[in-house]
Structures are given as C-alpha cells and as structure tokens.
Amino acid sequence: MRKVAMAIAVLALAGCGEGKSVETPAPKPAVTESQPQTGAVAAQEWDVRVGSPDHKLQAITDLTAWLLEHGFNFYIVKVDGKDEVLLGPFATKAEAEAKQTLLNEKMARAKKTDTVSEVIEHKATQ
C-alpha cells in the first residue's frame, strides 16, 4: 500500500511546476578550425543497470518508485523488447561505481535483496 501511495504522490507532484517557464540549456558551440579536435570517438560514458538478478519479470513501477523514494535519478530504455532501468550516464567509470556503491548500501539497509546493479558502458543509441 505504501508503494501505491508513493507512486500517487510522485504523479501528483509531477504537475506542480506546470505553467512555469523552464530555460532550455544553450546548445554547445560547433567545433571550429581553431578548436582542437580529439578525434571522431566521443568520450566514453557509463551507466548503472538496476534490476532483478536473474532478469525475471519485476514490477518496474515498484523498482522506480523505490529509486525515486531514495533519491536516485534514472531513465528507462528498451533492450531486446524488455525495459531496463539505468542510472546515469556518468562521465567516468569511477563515478558510476560510486553511485552503485551508494545504491547497494541503501538496498542493503532496506533489505532489498531482489535487486542487483552493475556498471555498464553507456550506449549512445539509447
């Protein structure tokens, strides 16, 4: 029941900022001849995948509600027709591992043993 109440509260609060103007971030300047180019390969980024250990069907709403309740920002992608919950992207693997450690500590305190996490390379096509 608590999870349902949390989900309703999150949905209710989602519309609280409605009507306020939001500034869009300024676009990054294009690379010019005067700027050094680092090559065609983009910087590598990292994500933390969160889910059940054997990838059984887990209620994604329960997982995402728990993540929201504990202060974790996430996004959802479809991989091979299945939804995956990811934290990130992080600029370095060390940042991703630090967030994974924090997540694992909070899951252990909450005795949430049905969820595991792993650091994966961020896919640009997501």
Image (cartoon, rainbow, N blue to C red):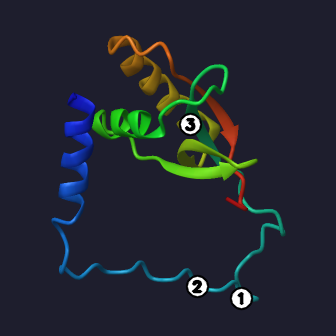
Front-most of residues 15 and 38: 15
| Mark earlier in primary sequence (1, 3) | 1
Q: CA distance from mark 2 to mark 1?
A: 9 Å
Local SS, label 1: loop
Residue drawn at 47 percent across, 34 percent down: 59
Q: In the rendered view, would you say 49 is above or below 117?
A: below
Label 3 sits on what residue type?
Answer: Ala
Mark 2 residue element: loop
For mark 2, what is the residue?
A: 29
> Where the C terminus falls, by quadrant?
bottom right
Which residue matches tag 1? 32
Q: Earlier in the sequence, mark 3 or mark 2?
A: 2
- Indicate which label's residue lies in the foreground, 3 or 2: 3
Residue type beneath disc 1: Thr
Q: CA distance from mark 1 to mark 3?
A: 32 Å
Separation of marks 3 and 2 at Cα, in angstroms: 27 Å
Q: How many marks?
A: 3
Quadrant in the rendering for residue 12: bottom left
Residue density around tag 1, few if under 14, some if 14–19, many if 20 or more, within 10 Å: few
